[in-house]
Image (cartoon, grey):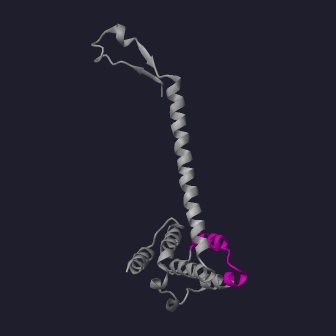
């Protein structure tokens, strides 16, 4: 694509003299475009960093019990379609690393990956209001991890969000 603008023949009323005039875009315009692109990249990085900071801040607010409960809910959603996909296992592994769970908790999570958590232990209304957004985001990340959202996952997730809203 050329950095040159020509006046059209309709604008110049067919004048060959005007048609032959070529107006180049100033080098400053290219610098400006690069600056805008860099600004947008910086803004995107800032927002990602801010989101990560908010996430880290929220993780700090979660006590050990709530961190484990978060993973329990995430594991239950991984089982929503009756099969845990490899990408879902990777997502859960990353989550438990970020949550810095202990060895004992890791063993519990492995049990939930082998067999779904008991439904009696999964009451969404017991999640503190201050932590609900993080639970929703973590579960949403899980159900998107394999690139497919099964009908069961979507329906269960919608019910989960409705229960949290009440």
Q: Residue at x 59, y 76 (%)?
A: 62
Question: In this rendering, is residue 32 above or below 23?
Answer: below
The x, y position of residue 111, in whole percent, is 63, 86
Measuring from the top left, give residue 31's x and y in whole percent.
54, 30
Residue 4 lies left or right of residue 62; in this view the side is: left
Q: Which residue does the image show at 42% across and 73% down from the upper left?
A: 154
Image quadrant assignment for residue 104: bottom right
The vertical placement of 2 against 56, above or below, is above
Q: As drawn, which residue projects farthest toward the top?
A: 17
Quadrant (top left, top right, bottom left, bottom right) of the C terminus: bottom left
> Is 18 located above or below residue 52 in the figure?
above
Magenta-tinted stretch: 85-106
Judging depth in this view, the residue of 152 and 140 nearest the camera is: 140
Q: Is residue 142 above or below residue 37?
A: below
Does residue 101 show up magenta in the picture?
Answer: yes
Q: Residue at x 29, y 12 (%)?
A: 14
Nearer to us in this view, 132 or 5: 132
**Identity of the residue furthest to the bottom in this view:** 120
Percent position (x, y) of residue 134?
52, 71
Q: Name the residue nearer the viewer: 119 or 81.
A: 119
Please give the name of the residue rendered at 58% of the width and 61% of the height, measured from the top-left corner: 52
Dominant secondary structure (helix, strand or loop) of the stretch shown in magenta: helix
Counting from the top left corner in percent of width and height, residue 80 is at 48, 80
Does the magenta segment cover residue 134? Answer: no
């Amino acid at each position: 694509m050329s950095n040159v603008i020509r006046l059209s023949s309709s604008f110049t009323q067919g004048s060959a003299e005007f048609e032959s005039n070529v107006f180049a875009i100033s080098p400053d315009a290219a610098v400006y475009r690069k600056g805008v692109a860099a600004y947008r990249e910086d803004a995107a990085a800032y927002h990602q960093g801010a989101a990560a900071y908010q996430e880290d801040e929220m993780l700090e607010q979660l006590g050990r019990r709530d961190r484990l409960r978060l993973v329990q809910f995430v594991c239950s959603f991984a089982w929503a379609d009756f099969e845990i996909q490899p990408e879902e296992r990777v997502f859960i592994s990353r989550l438990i690393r970020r949550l810095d769970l202990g060895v004992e908790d890791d063993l519990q999570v492995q049990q939930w990956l082998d067999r779904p958590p008991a439904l009696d232990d999964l009451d969404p209304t017991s999640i503190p209001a201050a932590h609900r957004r993080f639970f929703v985001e973590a579960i949403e990340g899980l159900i998107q991890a394999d690139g497919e959202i099964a009908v069961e996952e979507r329906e269960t997730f919608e019910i989960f969000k409705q229960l949290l809203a009440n």
